[in-house]
Amino acid sequence: MPAALAPVLPSRYERPHSPAHPLRPLHRPELPGHLDLPAPGAGIRLQSDTLPGLETVSPGDEDSVWLHDALLGPHSADIVRYLGLARSTGGPVLDLGSGAGRLAVPFARHGFAVEAVDRDGPALERLENWARRIGPQVAELIVTHRTDLTELRLDGDYRLALLAGAMVSAVPPHARPRLLREIASHLGAGGALALDYTSHLVPGLIAEPQRTWAFQVPRFDGIDEWVVARQDFDLRTMSERITYYATRTGKLSTERIVLSTDKWIVDGEHLAAELHAAGLHIEGRRRHRIDERTESVLLVCRTDD
């Protein structure tokens, strides 16, 4: 176990929490100065390639951009698939939960008009700044709106709507049917909704409701960052909390922070029924097995015209 992980042992922090409200902003409490290494067999898994289901749906900041990108793991290649879909549907494109423009800006660079929606104002500012740095030919194709997905009210019509980066798991189950109906009612003829999520196999959740992962964040700015991420699943409420204990070491100092995200466990059958009720049918489904208990799922849905 790398020495950099010693200050961030999850078991010495807060107990698992199943929130009544699913979404909380990232919080950064002060960390104790000394923690012991985990005992042998404590269940921490070192992972360096794919990180199963550890993506965050909470607002981030500029210091967490590297971590957010690393956490996307199984969804990191989705832009290629989404761009291919956009070439068949045309624009405009609706990017729901856009963050700082991971998809919106490349779409605009390919000539698509994009409406980017996110509840995090600073992330939308970073998106706009990025687009302006590229040039007016990109910036002029992007419109941003700050709103929570549970309160989404659309005015325009779109050929492609995206719920990418597992953003559907950020929407409470009681609010998801209304969101899907709102999206479907604003898709033009031949339009599509594309979404992805992490699917956890229920037997695996029952057998192991708490999981802990340790990994190094790929960075190219001179900072060495190690993270221990703890997943706590609650099958009673079908919710999940992930807590990230990070140590960032530079040339002159070391920073220790704690970030968290709250999500809902997505049941594929329930989601399919909600899509059908909203007037959408699943045209394509792509599954990618991450490990023996987890897979990423990408759905392409069309209106029932």
Image (cartoon, rainbow, N blue to C red):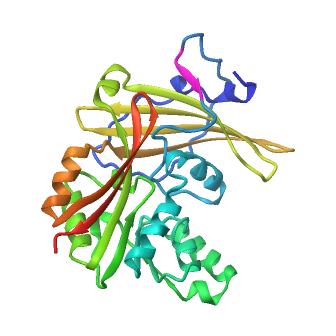
Q: Position of residue 51 (x, y in %)?
A: 53, 38
Rendering coords of residue 33 (x, y %): 68, 29
Indicate yes or no whether the magenta region holds residue 78: no
- Residue 5 x, y percent position in the rendering: 68, 28
Please give the range of residues in magenta.
Answer: 42-46
Q: Is residue 65 left or right of residue 59?
A: right
113 or 283, nearer to the observer: 283
Q: Residue furthest left?
A: 277
As drawn, the residue found furthest toward the top would be: 40
Question: Is residue 116 something one can see in this rendering?
Answer: no
Question: Residue at position x 54%, y 83% from top?
Answer: 111
**Residue 185 horizontal/vertical position (percent):** 21, 76
Q: Residue at 38%, 22% (x, y): give it.
A: 208
42 or 190, which is in the foreground?
190
Describe residue 6's horizontal placement relative to residue 177 as left or right.
right
Label tally: 0
Classified by dominant secondary structure, the portion drawn in magenta counts as strand
Query: Who's the residue at 57% across and 72% down the image?
Result: 106
Instruction: Point out the residue furthest to the right here.
Output: 251
Q: Quadrant of the C terminus?
A: bottom left
Q: Quadrant of the N terminus?
A: top right
Q: Is residue 177 above or below residue 132?
A: above
Q: Is 21 on the left or on the right of 295, as rendered?
A: left
Name above or below for residue 13 compared with residue 198.
Answer: above
- Camera-nearest residue between 180 and 251: 180
Instruction: Identify which residue is drawn at 55% across, 46% down.
Output: 71
The answer to whether residue 266 shows anywhere in this view is yes
Q: Nearer the viewer, residue 124 or 109?
A: 109
